[in-house]
Image (tube, helix red, strand yellow):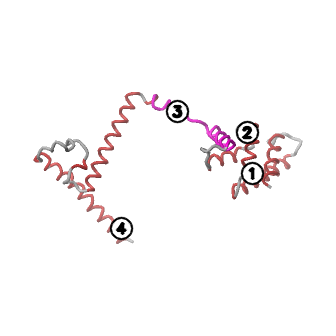
């Protein structure tokens, strides 16, 4: 293992030495170079046009140029004001994204596709009326019919545990389990069991 590490560090050191030497070699012949032909790109142009550079040197130069262009773009944003760059798109909450996901599933749009994070959010918050309103709960029940695998099993287990807690707390006291929530838990358990 130690030999392999030494070999790897030796190889990387050799590569670094070559890369350090390469830019020094490039700078020397540049002043002696003959003027470029009429069809060739200007000297500040693409580095790929220089036949003297190895493929690795070309890649390094391309990366440097790309980095410089990117820096220039960022400076332009800074001068215009960062607030204007961020303001066009406001972030939507997880609740809104999950409800939109549920509505698009109900409409069977071609653009709908499964999203694990949205489904997880819906399953976690489905008994909370402030997060999943009554008008969306019937759609959620229809969505839960197609639930398969471990998500279905965990949802049933969670529902059963919540029903046990509600029974232990007492059906008469509203406490942490209002009647509305208990009704929703029963509906989900009837659907999935």
Residue at x 75% of width, y 38% of height: 129
Secondary structure category for the residue under label 3:
loop
Callout 2 environment at 10 Å: few (<14), some (14 to 19), or many (20+)?
Answer: some
Is residue 68 found left or right of 103 in the rendered image? left
Q: Quadrant of the C terminus?
A: bottom right
Q: Which quadrant of the figure has residue 82?
A: top left
- Circle nearer the N terminus (3, 4): 4
Camera-side mark, 4 or 2? 2
Q: Which region of the structure is painted magenta?
A: 84-107
Instruction: Give the percent coordinates (x, y) of residue 62.
Output: 29, 48
Callout 4 environment at 10 Å: few (<14), some (14 to 19), or many (20+)?
Answer: few
The residue identified by callout 1 is 145
The Cα–Cα distance between marks 3 and 4, rounded to whole angstroms, is 48 Å
The Cα–Cα distance between marks 2 and 3, rounded to whole angstroms, is 26 Å
Camera-side mark, 3 or 1? 1
The Cα–Cα distance between marks 3 and 1, rounded to whole angstroms, is 35 Å
Instruction: Give the percent coordinates (x, y) of residue 4.
Output: 36, 70
- Circle nearer the N terminus (1, 4): 4
Q: In which quarter of the image is the N terminus?
A: bottom left
Which numbered dot is residue 173?
Answer: none
Q: Eyeballing the image, is 7 above or below 64? A: below
The residue identified by callout 3 is 89
Instruction: Give the percent coordinates (x, y) of residue 90.
Output: 54, 32
Foreground of the two, 153 or 17: 153
Which numbered dot is residue 136?
Answer: 2
Callout 3 environment at 10 Å: few (<14), some (14 to 19), or many (20+)?
Answer: few
Is residue 114 found left or right of 79 in the rendered image? right
Residue at x 52% of width, y 33% of height: 89
The residue identified by callout 4 is 5
Secondary structure category for the residue under label 4:
helix
């Amino acid at each position: 293992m130690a030999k392999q590490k030494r070999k790897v560090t030796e190889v990387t050191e050799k590569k670094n030495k070559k890369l350090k030497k390469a830019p020094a070699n490039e700078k020397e012949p540049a002043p002696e170079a003959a003027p470029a032909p009429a069809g060739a790109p200007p000297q500040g142009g693409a580095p790929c046009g220089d036949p003297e550079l190895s493929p690795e040197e070309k890649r390094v130069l391309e990366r440097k140029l790309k980095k410089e262009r990117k820096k220039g773009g960022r400076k332009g944003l800074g001068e215009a004001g960062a607030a204007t760059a961020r303001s066009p798109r406001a972030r939507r909450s997880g609740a809104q994204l999950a409800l939109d996901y549920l509505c698009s599933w109900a409409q069977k749009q071609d653009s709908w596709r499964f999203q694990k994070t949205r489904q997880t959010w819906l399953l976690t918050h489905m008994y909370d009326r402030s997060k999943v309103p009554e008008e969306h709960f019937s759609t959620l029940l229809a969505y839960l019919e197609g639930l398969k695998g471990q998500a279905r099993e965990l949802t049933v287990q969670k529902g059963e545990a919540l029903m046990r807690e509600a029974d232990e707390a007492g059906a008469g006291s509203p406490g942490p389990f209002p009647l509305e929530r208990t009704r929703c838990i029963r509906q989900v358990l009837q659907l999935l069991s």
